[in-house]
Amino acid sequence: MDSTDQASDKLLFEIIQLEVEIDKVLALNGNREDFVVKQYRKFIHAKRNRLNKINYHYKDQSSLPAH
């Protein structure tokens, strides 16, 4: 597993953890979104953007012909 795979897996794990935390907070708040949930959603958005950039770059590199 190369560093791109590891970074991608780590980001996925962090996103899943944040989504679980959102579920917990929503359950405690009666499904109302508060400041914490909004912050978690911003973190998830940023991590997904980073993940997309990593994977897009990885796909570009893997499609290059071997020398």
Image: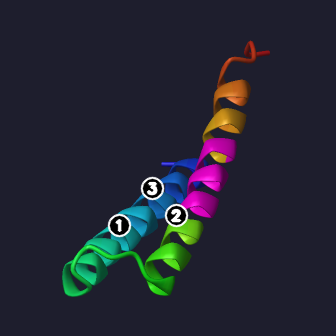
Tell whether label 1 touches label 3 (CB within 8 Å): no
Query: For numbered disc 2, what is the local secondary structure?
Result: helix
Tell whether label 1 touches label 2 (CB within 8 Å): yes
Prevailing secondary structure of the magenta residues: helix
Q: Is residue 51 left or right of residue 18?
A: right
Point out the tag, 2 or 1, that comes first from the N-terminus: 1
Q: What amino acid is labelled 3 in the image?
A: Asp
Point out the tag, 3 or 2, that comes first from the N-terminus: 3
Query: Up-down: is 59 above or below 27?
Result: above
When asked about the image quadrant of residue 3, the answer is bottom right
Query: For numbered disc 1, what is the local secondary structure?
Result: helix
Query: Up-down: is 3 above or below 66?
Result: below
What is the number of the mark on residue 44? 2
What is the number of the mark on residue 52? none
Badge count:
3
Residue at 61 percent across and 39 percent down: it is 55
Query: For numbered disc 3, what is the local secondary structure?
Result: helix
Q: What amino acid is labelled 2 in the image?
A: Ile
Residue at 52 percent across and 49 percent down: it is 5
Q: Which residue is mark 1?
A: 19
Magenta residues?
44-53
Which is more foreground, mark 3 or mark 1? 1
Q: Position of residue 34 (x, y in %)?
A: 44, 82
Neighbour tally class for label 2: few under 14, some 14-19, many 20 plus, Cα within 10 Å: many
What is the number of the mark on residue 9? 3
